[in-house]
Amino acid sequence: MTKNGIDVSEWQGDIDWNKVRTDFVVIRAGYGKEISQKDKKFERNYSGAKAAGIPCGAYWYSYAVNEDEARREAAVCIEVLKGKQFEYPIYLDVEEKKVLDLGREKVSAIINAFLLELEKAGYYAGLYM
């Protein structure tokens, strides 16, 4: 079985969710380690996708360069997601060159720290790269 999905963030502007044709959506919840870095369109995208009956997941874009920063980012992500229902995983998005340049062992530790916090909070966690 193949399912087609999309990812969205504030960069797509105001989406007309009634016109979207997809099996699922992964919505950027935010990035970084501050609550002020919540995606400006997260609430709108979440409520619009839900109203249109589109199953949702979410992702958090990471800048963490160590495990402590990853746990801090996870805590903020969890705060943003509070009270919402997701049919798909919550993903950690790791793409930053400065993070990837840390090497496999350190990047793996950062990823594991973030995903463990999500799982402890009851979310099904995934990695998006």
Image (spheres, grey):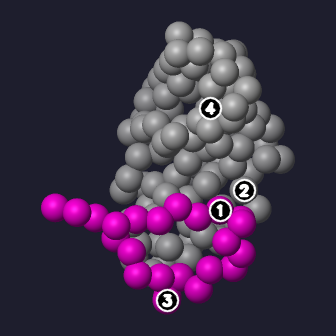
Q: Which mark is residue 9?
A: 1
| Residue 75 appears anywhere in the view | no
Q: Position of residue 106 (x, y in %)?
A: 59, 12
Residue lying farthest right? 36
Task: Classify 10 Å Cα crowding around label 4: few (below 14), some (14-19), many (20 and above).
Answer: many
Of the two numbered discs 2 and 3 on the same chain, state the one appearing first in sequence.
3
Residue for point 80% across, 38% down:
34
Residue type at mark 2: give it: Asp
Percent x, y for residue 118? 50, 32
- Earlier residue among tags 1 and 4: 1
Q: Secondary structure at mark 4?
A: helix
| Stretch in magenta | 1-23
Quarter-of-image position of residue 23: bottom left
Cα distance in 3D space between marks 2 and 4: 15 Å
- SS for tag 3? helix
> Label 4, on which residue?
74
- Would you name the residue on which mark 3 appears? 19
Where is mark 2, residue-wise? 39
Question: Tag 1: residue type?
Answer: Ser
Left or right position of 20 against 34: left
